[in-house]
Amino acid sequence: MDNLVGQGRLAIDMIVDPDSFLEGVVGSLQLTDEEFGPGAVIGTASLNGVICTIIANDAMTMNQKFPVVYAGIIGLEEGYKMALAVYHSIEADRDRAPGEKRALVLIVDTPGNGAGKLEEIAGMNKATGAYQMALAEARKAGHPIVAIVVGRAISGGFLCHGLQADHVLSLAAAFNTMIHVMPLTSIARITRLNIEWLQDLAETNPVFAAGPDFFYRLGGVEELVDSIPAMRERVIAHVAEVRALKAAGKEDQLGPWGRGTLGEARGGRTVRGRVMQTMNEEFAAVADRYLK
Amino acid sequence: MSSDWETLQNRSFLESNARARAIGLVDPGTFTELAGPRCRLSSPHLPLLGEAVEFDDGVVTGVGLYGSRPLFIASQEGRFVGGSVGEVHGAKLVNIVRMAHQAYARMLADNPELPEERRPAVVISFETGGVRLHEANAGLLAHAELMDQFQDCKGKVPIIGIIGGRVGCFGGMGFVAAATDAIIMSPFGRLGLTGPEVIEEEMGKDEFDASDRALVYRVTGGKHKYVMGDCNLLVTDTIAAFRQGLGKVLAMPYVEIDRLRRIGSLEKVLTQLRTVAALVEISPHDSRDVWTYAGNAAADKLVDMKLDEFLKTVKRLEIAS
């Protein structure tokens, strides 16, 4: 097997305990309409003997009601369906201690959000926002959330499905994984900059180049996984690591904020921290005037 | 200072720059800019690509007062690389939100009985196409950080979005705006995820004709967002009107502000899903089809109607539960 691009369902089976995935069911949620948000696969599985919620993309289907939603694109129904899975995970474990909240595993292979007129009339920004807000709420309620990129993690699609996780893993570039906002050819066209020059620059500056290696250097991906069979073990290990950090009160090392710090440590995003520090220092000097 | 502030009030919000908007939205003479141009915190990435920089990286961040309430403000400048979010710009946005909930925690520690009208609030004037392509990856990661900081504010610190600039609010910032507690727009404000030009490029002119400016405004503009409930207040295009709208929201008890949200709970997701199902039924080709469905018999007339008359006439979309 060369790669898993377009194979979200296969990736689920390779990560969770054998034959444990129950599709459409999360806590009290039971989805039976197969035509509802088919680009998103949600359900419950067992991971190393422990219950977890699975949220993945299905690139092999299309949404009959929304012609722009196919090949793993997250449309209106898909975004809200993913949000439902998260809220029902929170609800199912509401009475559990923070250390016993079920993990959420996000299996990422999406080229983006639905781009269509109907989507804009309805407000596609709300559907993708709703899922991200649900994930942030679950993360802060104690659920460990681990995302693994198995195919495409493109721009707004990656923000929607992936970047709100506690930890983000990605299969290495050798497995044709793609992480970017736009390919360099498109960046060159829109910014009217020379493509060969951009390609040279991309070697040394990770902030605009495409690929999982650059996101790793920016702290946007915690770990690159170098074999397909290793995915399962790495996801299990990261769920455990995230759980331990939460138990130790080290939430600041997790999620988008943790990746900000990681970006600085890896030398990829070095001005971010300086900007924030300047603001904090300047505010400290005038704070008494405002906070009474 | 205050005479300058007075002249700002009647200015067009659309025509004003980001700094004038920030100064004019808060009480006279109370705005203090943080990490302003004097700090020269410009993008380290743009010069590598031979592009010009600005010393504020296209966003004005600072604090001000609205009555006794501290406001943490970010105001994006659409004239600089389309208000786009790069590393510095993103860090300023993320940190202004973080400062607000940290200030709230500090005030609450000093005074557990802190009255609601003194709680900090976040105000973001969105004018942006989202991620800055020249430093795309850093910009993308900043969007995720913003959503994370918003969650820390939820239930504590109100976040109010303002959309009235020329560029509108698109790309990733479209969902960041959707995640605020309340949104105030003028009819000139535009809000969406994928801009019409991008839809046309990806899906063809049959899907969305981006050269049809009237269609673009009907689908993404303030009036449609008001009908949909995607913006809470629609105001005229002056700084004073936006400031007044801000006052209206801030005068509400926090529980009521929280009810203005469109998303952010299971209940709200279920409501949005009912709206989506209704739209599938109508299969609209234009926002006017939705306006008609909402009970506006003369939807065409609403398009060019003056704002005060529009607000008196329009029926907003209500989906039965």
Image: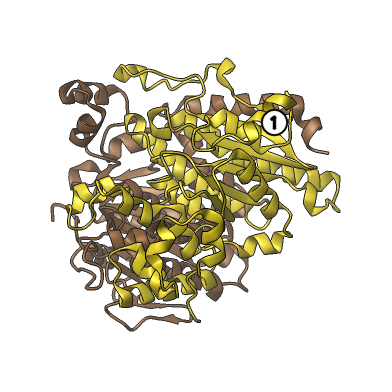
Chain colours: A brown, B yellow
Relative to residue A14, is residue A256 drawn left or right? right
Which quadrant of the rendered structure holds the N terminus of chain B? Answer: top right
Residue B163: tell me if it is visible.
yes
Q: Eyeballing the image, is B316 above or below B149?
A: below
Q: Nearer the viewer, residue A13 or B281?
A: B281
Name the subunit of mark 1: B
Residue type at mark 1 is: Glu
Q: Nearer the viewer, residue B68 or B17?
A: B17
- Where does residue A274 sit, x and y in percent of width and height? 55, 24
Outermost residue toward the left in this view: A1
- Where does residue A281 sit, x and y in percent of width and height? 68, 25
Relative to residue B68, is residue B35 drawn left or right? left
Relative to residue A198, is residue B8 drawn left or right? right
Name the residue at 25% across, 52% down: A111
- Where does residue A61 sit, x and y in percent of width and height? 19, 69
Residue A219: tell me if it is visible.
no
Q: Eyeballing the image, is B308 above or below B139?
A: below
Residue corresponding to mark 1: B6
Secondary structure of the residue carrying numbered label 1:
helix
Name the residue at 30% across, 55% down: A231
Q: Eyeballing the image, is B21 above or below A20?
A: above
Name the residue at 43% across, 43% down: B168
